[in-house]
């Protein structure tokens, strides 16, 4: 079984390696992107033998991505320009080297065709609005980086989210699940939002939120991450990228370690060198950005 878009870790199984798969969290409640977890070691899932074929009539190359579709798509769409700029933004902001590994994006014309293909090709996957899959090649070498999505109301958010996974996995050995999802939640938002997810912030600030990065660091299966875990992962990433330079340095240094080492240890331990009480720092950070939000709640969500 393939693993969802956020983590590319493979698991040794009789007969070879299984790919890592990640999904966007959108279908869980019908709004945001939703991401799937990777298969467990005892998974019996297999890729179905099926005549189903992904879109491929048209191909458009945009930056590091190739978009395949069975309906005509213009290369000069504002969305494509934005996604090309997002690639540059992510590599620059995270101080990662630019990669040449192509991320293949299969765009279905509508949800029905997308779901029909995913059921046939990956029958064991949970129903989700978009997926990223790092698929090992049969003859070895660099994994194929694949994104599956459909052209719907959430296509912008879905593509930003899943392509973030693809870009990260094109340059890093692996990414801890929670951090992979936190970064995707951060960059799925357009640049003018400065990484602020108003809905996440509202629920964290006015709900019974008890942060626990140590617990997040123990999660290895996407199915173990619910909406609360996605929100918390986003919050920690926003703290590190937008609070103080020392915290930003902790995250960037950790990502550099991930370029060569898939298991560089606990990020929380390194963060405690900047914040003796990380939970208090996170609460203060969320309160600060909450106080700076637009007064109009509708505007804040747009």
Image (spheres, rainbow, N blue to C red):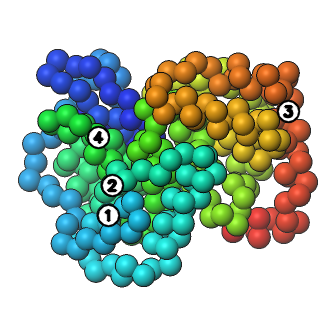
Quadrant of the frame with the C terminus: bottom right
**Which residue matches tag 1?**
66
Q: Quadrant of residue 294?
A: bottom right
- Residue for badge 4: 143
Q: For mark 3, give the secondary structure.
A: helix
Residue neighbourhood size for the residue with mark 3, other residues' Cα within 10 Å, grouped as few (<14), some (14–19), many (≥20): some
Give the numbered dot on residue 106.
Answer: none
Looking at the picture, how far across and down is residue 125, in whole percent? Answer: 32, 40
Residue 140 appears left or right of 202 = left
Asked if the residue at tag 2 contacts the one at tag 3, i.e. Cβ–Cβ closer than 8 Å, the answer is: no
As helix, strand or loop, the secondary structure at mark 2 comes to loop
Residue denoted by label 2: 102
- What residue is shown at x 70% (from left), y 66% (from top)? 192
Residue pictured at 48% horizontal, 66% vertical: 84
Q: Are marks 1 and 2 in contact (CB under 8 Å)?
A: yes
Residue underneath mark 3: 281
Q: Quadrant of the N terminus?
A: top left
Q: Nearer the viewer, mark 3 or mark 1?
A: 1
Q: Give the mark nearest the N terminus, 4 or 3.
A: 4
3D distance between C-alphas at marks 1 and 2: 7 Å
Q: Earlier in the sequence, mark 3 or mark 2?
A: 2
Nearer mark to the viewer, of 3 and 2: 2
Q: Earlier in the sequence, mark 4 or mark 1?
A: 1
Q: Position of residue 105 (x, y in %)?
A: 33, 59
Specify whether 30 is left or right of 54. Answer: right
User: Eyeballing the image, is 25 above or below 104?
Assistant: above
Q: Is residue 228 visible?
A: no
């Amino acid at each position: 079984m393939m693993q969802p878009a956020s983590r590319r870790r493979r698991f040794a199984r009789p007969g070879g390696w299984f790919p890592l798969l990640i999904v966007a969290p959108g279908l869980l409640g019908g709004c945001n992107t939703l991401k799937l977890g990777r298969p467990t070691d005892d998974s019996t899932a297999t890729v179905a033998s099926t005549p189903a074929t992904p879109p491929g009539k048209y191909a458009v190359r945009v930056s590091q991505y190739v978009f395949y579709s069975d309906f005509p798509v213009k290369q000069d769409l504002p969305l494509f320009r934005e996604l090309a700029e997002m690639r540059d933004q992510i590599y620059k902001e995270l101080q990662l080297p630019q990669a040449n590994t192509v991320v293949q994006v299969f765009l279905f014309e509508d949800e029905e065709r997308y779901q029909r293909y995913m059921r046939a090709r990956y029958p064991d996957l949970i129903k989700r609005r978009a997926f990223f899959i790092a698929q090992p090649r049969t003859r070895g070498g660099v994994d194929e980086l694949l994104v599956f999505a459909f052209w719907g109301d959430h296509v912008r958010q879905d593509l930003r989210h899943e392509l973030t996974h693809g870009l990260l996995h094109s340059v890093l050995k692996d990414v801890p699940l929670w951090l992979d999802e936190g970064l995707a939640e951060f960059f799925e938002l357009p640049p003018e939002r400065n990484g602020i997810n108003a809905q996440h912030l509202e629920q964290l600030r006015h709900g019974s939120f008890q942060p626990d990065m140590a617990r997040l660091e123990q999660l290895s299966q996407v199915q173990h991450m619910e909406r609360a875990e996605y929100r918390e992962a986003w919050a920690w990433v926003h703290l590190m990228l937008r609070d103080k330079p020392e915290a930003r340095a902790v995250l960037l240094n950790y990502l550099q370690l991930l370029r060569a080492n898939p298991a560089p240890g606990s990020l929380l331990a390194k963060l405690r060198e900047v914040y003796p009480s990380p939970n208090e720092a996170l609460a203060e950070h969320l309160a600060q950005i909450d106080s700076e939000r637009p007064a109009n709640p509708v505007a804040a969500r747009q």
